[in-house]
Amino acid sequence: MNELIKEIQQFRDDRDWGGNHDARSLAISISLEASELLECFQWRSGEDSIAYDKQAIVDEMADVFIYLLQFSDVLGEDLIMAARQKMKKNAIKYPNPTKS
């Protein structure tokens, strides 16, 4: 994961885009890219959307992921650890109904 973050940072820095990658701008970019992902499904069922252009969906997923990694880096947070902690919170909030 750290290697990928370094690659993303190098790509950003090579283009002198660092000034646009503050927390606010990255949060906006995540939302915009997520909207582009959603656009892949506009006017089609999920199955039809995937059959029509799965690569576009994968590309938009990757854009969201790249921005999330940059955002977590700016905040100094480990995204994997944050996801694990959130899953623990979700398990408490939404207990497994089969284990009652």
Image (cartoon, rainbow, N blue to C red):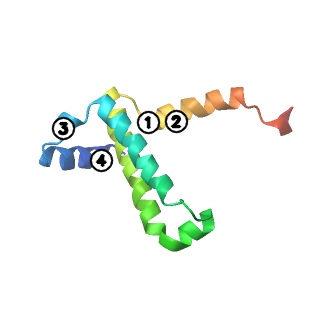
The local crowd at label 2, few if under 14, some if 14 to 19, many if 20 or more residues have their Cα within 10 Å, is: few
> In the figure, residue 77 lies in which quadrant?
top left
Please tell me the numbered disc located at residue 18. Answer: 3
Work out whether mark 1 precedes mark 3 in sequence or the reverse, and give the earlier one: 3
Please tell me the numbered disc located at residue 83. Answer: 2
Separation of residues labelled 4 and 3 (CA atoms): 18 Å
At horizontal 45% and vertical 48% (from top left) the residue drawn is 35
Q: In the rendered structure, which amino acid carries the disc numbered 3?
A: Gly
At horizontal 47% and vertical 70% (from top left) the residue drawn is 53
The local crowd at label 1, few if under 14, some if 14 to 19, many if 20 or more residues have their Cα within 10 Å, is: some
Q: What residue is disc 1 on?
A: 79
At horizontal 32% and vertical 43% (from top left) the residue drawn is 2
Front disc: 4 or 3: 3
Question: Looking at the rendering, in which quadrant would you find the N terminus?
Answer: top left
Q: In terms of secondary structure, where does tag 3 sit?
A: helix
The answer to whether mark 1 and mark 3 are in CB contact below 8 A is: no
Q: What residue is disc 4 on?
A: 3
Farthest residue, direction front:
43
How many discs mark residues in the rendered view? 4
Q: In the rendered structure, which amino acid carries the disc numbered 2?
A: Ala
Front disc: 1 or 3: 3
Give how far across and how far down residue 87 sits, in percent: 61, 34
Question: Looking at the rendering, in which quadrant would you find the C terminus?
Answer: top right
